[in-house]
Image (cartoon, rainbow, N blue to C red):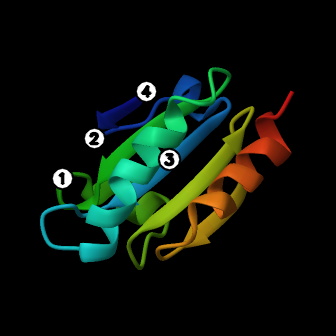
Amino acid sequence: MLRNETSLTQSDLINSLVFFGAPSWCLPCQRLLPVIENISEEFDNAQFIHINVDEADELVREYKISSVPTVKIFVNGEEKESLYGLLPKTTYIDKLNLYFGD
């Protein structure tokens, strides 16, 4: 399940996909949001977090978000992958399988 947050804790970064977007004005973000929501139902062993960049200036600076959508994958608190722009659903699934597959 995808949950909305305005801050991140260390436990949020354990096995997680963090989607930085701006759904109110970013068309690619609007298109990606339901894709990530759908994917989140397929992976029980990962957290899925949505950060609205318009409501989380501190996180935007901390994670150096310069464009949206940006998706970051964290494993045990360490950033492993960053994906930029609207990519095919299979790209996200392949990356998640790489890090969180059975």
- The answer to whether the residues at label 2 and label 1 have Cβ atoms under 8 Å apart is yes
Q: In this view, does 50 lie above or below 57?
A: above
Mark 1 or 3: in front is: 3
Q: Residue at x 35, y 31 (%)?
A: 3
- How crowded is the residue under tag 4: few (<14 C-alpha within 10 Å), some, or many (20+)? some
Q: Residue at x 51, y 29 (%)?
A: 41
N-terminal of the two: label 2 or label 3?
2
In percent of width and height, residue 72 lies at 58, 55
> The residue under label 3 is which amino acid type?
Val
- How crowded is the residue under tag 2: few (<14 C-alpha within 10 Å), some, or many (20+)? some
> The residue under label 1 is which amino acid type?
Glu
Mark 4 → mark 1, Cα distance in angstroms = 20 Å
Q: Name the residue under label 4.
A: 1
Mark 3 → mark 4, Cα distance in angstroms = 12 Å
Q: Which of 96 and 8 is in front in this view?
A: 96
Q: Mark 2 points at which residue?
A: 6
N-terminal of the two: label 4 or label 1?
4
Mark 4 → mark 2, Cα distance in angstroms = 16 Å
Mark 4 or 2: in front is: 4
Q: Mark 1 points at which residue?
A: 55
Mark 2 → mark 1, Cα distance in angstroms = 6 Å
N-terminal of the two: label 1 or label 3?
3
Q: Name the residue under label 3.
A: 18
Mark 3 or 4: in front is: 4
- How crowded is the residue under tag 3: few (<14 C-alpha within 10 Å), some, or many (20+)? many
- Tell me: 91 left or right of 65: right
